[in-house]
């Protein structure tokens, strides 16, 4: 994810004066973009060597290229707009499996070697093997009322004892909550 990328950026910019980075960071909304302040601080320190581009999938932007999902077509358009005369030594991509596959295919079509494309994949639905436990019998009185506040919106639902984690229960009730941490 962004945590190791931020570390790589900071260390390399500090220690290798000829290094340059193009960061294309896809997110839902600017307000939920991790480390945005730290990235801008690095941009202020290394303005000639660090290019930041934020692509928002659920927030209107003034520039169409910065709107939408980061897929293969978006990567090709961003490459044409910003890197037509540049060749990256290495590319780091992070996200859900379908996005990584699409982005990788697009980068290969642009002439990048697959061994120079590094990825960290987010997978949903990964679960540890459950330890057998006696089944609890749910009655209407069991469970709890859960309220989730995300992006300034409140949603409440009833969570029973067999609904799994709060994240799983929220997803089961139709909330679009981030889940990349489940892959860890």
Image (cartoon, rainbow, N blue to C red):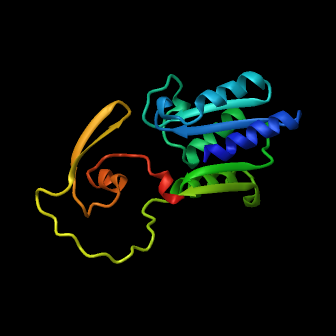
Task: State whether residue 47 appears in this view.
Answer: no
Q: Nearer the viewer, residue 142 or 81?
A: 142
Query: Which percent across, then down, holds residue 21?
Result: 75, 37
Q: Nearer the viewer, residue 135 or 10?
A: 135
Count of numbered circles on the image: 0
Location of residue 102 with respect to 67 vertically, above or below = below
Query: Which percent across, then down, holds residue 107?
Result: 67, 51
Location of residue 127 with respect to 61 vertically, above or below = below
Left or right for 111, reference 29? right
Q: Residue drawn at (84%, 37%), measured in percent from left and top?
A: 19
Q: Residue drawn at (72%, 42%), measured in percent from left and top?
A: 7
Q: Residue drawn at (45%, 59%), measured in percent from left and top?
A: 124
Left or right for 75, reference 113? left
Classify the position of the C terminus by image quarter.
bottom right
Task: State whether residue 179 appears in this view.
Answer: yes
Task: In the displayed orientation, state which residue is furthest to the left.
Answer: 140
Query: Which percent across, then down, holds residue 81?
Result: 67, 33
Location of residue 162 with respect to 78 vertically, above or below = below
Left or right for 135, reference 178? left
Left or right for 148, reference 63? left
């Amino acid at each position: 994810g962004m945590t190791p990328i931020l570390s790589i950026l900071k260390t390399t910019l500090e220690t290798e004066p000829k290094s340059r980075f193009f960061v294309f960071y896809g997110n839902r909304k600017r307000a939920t973009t991790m480390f945005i302040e730290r990235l801008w601080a690095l941009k202020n320190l290394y303005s000639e060597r660090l290019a930041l581009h934020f692509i928002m999938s659920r927030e209107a932007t003034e520039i169409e290229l910065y709107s939408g999902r980061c897929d293969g077509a978006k990567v090709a358009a961003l490459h044409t707009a910003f890197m037509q005369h540049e060749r990256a030594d290495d590319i780091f991509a992070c996200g859900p499996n379908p996005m990584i596959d699409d982005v990788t295919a697009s980068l290969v079509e642009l002439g990048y070697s697959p061994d120079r494309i590094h990825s960290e994949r987010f997978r949903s639905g990964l679960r540890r093997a459950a330890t057998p436990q006696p089944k609890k019998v749910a009655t209407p009185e069991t469970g709890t009322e859960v309220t989730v506040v995300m992006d300034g919106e409140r949603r409440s639902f009833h969570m029973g004892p067999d609904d799994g984690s709060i994240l799983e229960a929220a997803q089961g009730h139709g909330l679009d909550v981030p889940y990349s941490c489940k892959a860890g």
